[in-house]
Amino acid sequence: MTQNLAIPELNATQRWRSLIAVIGSVFGVGVSFGALVPLMSLILEQRGVDTALIGLNSSMFPLAVLLVTPFLPRLVARLGAMISILWGLVITVVAILLLPVLPQLSAWFVLRFLIGAGMAIHWMVSETWMNMIASERTRATIMGAYATVLAGGFALGPILLQITGTEGWLPFAAAAVATASSALPLLLGLGLAPLLSVQKGRSILRMMRLVPLGMAAALTGGLTDTGIIVLLPIYGLRIGFDEATAVLLLTVFIAGNVALQIPIGWMADRISRRGVLLACAGIGVAGAVLLPFVLQQPVLLWSLLFIWGGTVFAFYTVGLSLVGQSIPSGQFAAANAAFILLYESGSITGPAIGGAAMDLVGPHGLFGMVAVASLALILVALMTPRPRAGQPPD
């Protein structure tokens, strides 16, 4: 039995207003998340909390995403896209403001879980909204713009902490304001949000089978993105770089993430999304192999790291556009939920696998993990039948 899904009949101007509204709304959430992660870790460190407990506390966000996301498609179908996003923002803001009120570590576990749950709602609904409103001709470019805005927010989060400091209410209030500001762009999309619904019997596991290449890109993206972000500065220190240069490695990598998503999305729309994903995976392998040989050649190192960062992060961008291309609109919510679940699964395991590889074979083990993951994605792409646009692959 199928519940009908309605998409407003939008003209070109309304379509772009709708897309600008939802893409704009991710910036404030990105800033808030980018500030909260280091803020909470620094405060817990200052309180003398064990490193293991700090790490366990930080895992509440991905745990919330993994546990909450499977229930979101039906919840969102009942509430609607706009109301669901607003409720997600409310939950997040309230939980952030309670952090300085309830400073006990046990309370922070609960509150961090609630922050993850609230942000998961925004994450899933915003990506479903974009995939439903985007035209097939510009789908990957739009996903690239979304990834650019989100990554830009992440990058500004730590800068916000430099302004507010890490003591007292101010940094938490600033993060809450950043989150609440995400509601402002949504005013531009009033009456222009898609009406989300679900098809009964379309489980998340079913979505994984329908779009294996898109889902493989999500898992690979989670493994590589988070593994590199967490471990690249450690890699720099272990190969003998000073602390400033080790941090610069990550800065250049993230700069590639921010700068290249729109150009890569544009190419994917005009050439072939599968082909561009294959090219990105190929660069993922090549960059991992070549980077250890250019560490003492600054021009080559920074150029290659910039390009590598953008193409590895594009696993997510292009994979998300493949999901939108291959899934009927009535199944977008479940498909996006599956995509997010796999990305977060990779995010949880990536640092552990990369760290184990570095301990086992030395610092370059991190690049070995990225090369193997990228090669596996290439194999999935070569083995997966080509889907017809708007049709499930099988």
Image (cartoon, grey):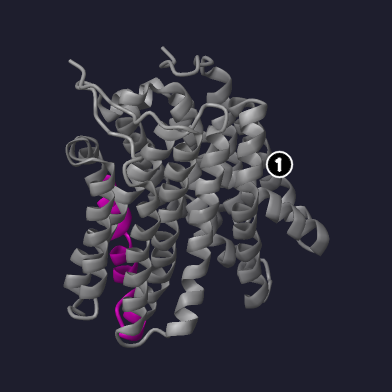
Prevailing SS of the magenta stretch: helix
Q: Is residue 359 visible?
A: no
Could you tell whether 32 is left or right of 47 in the image? right
Q: Residue at x 19, y 35 (%)?
A: 74
Q: Residue at x 31, y 58 (%)?
A: 61
With respect to residue 157, does 25 lie above or below?
Answer: above
Could you tell whether 331 is left or right of 78 in the image? right
With respect to residue 373, does 186 lie above or below?
Answer: below
Q: Secondary structure at mark 1?
A: helix
**Boundaries of the magenta span:** 43-66
Residue 206: which quarter of the image? top left
- Horizontal and vertical percent for residue 177? 34, 71
Residue 378: which quarter of the image? top right
- Horizontal and vertical percent for residue 125? 32, 43
With respect to residue 257, does 98 lie above or below?
Answer: below
Residue 275 counted in the magenta span: no
Image quarter (top left, top right, bottom left or bottom right) of the N terminus: top left
Q: Residue at x 36, y 27 (%)?
A: 208
| Near-viewer residue (362 or 264) | 264
| Near-viewer residue (155 or 127) | 127
Image quarter (top left, top right, bottom left or bottom right) of the C terminus: top left
Q: Where is mark 1, residue-wise?
A: 286
| Near-viewer residue (378 or 264) | 264
What's the residue type where badge 1 is placed? Ala
- Horizontal and vertical percent for residue 314? 57, 42
Q: Residue at x 34, y 81 (%)?
A: 43
With respect to residue 187, does 139 lie above or below?
Answer: above
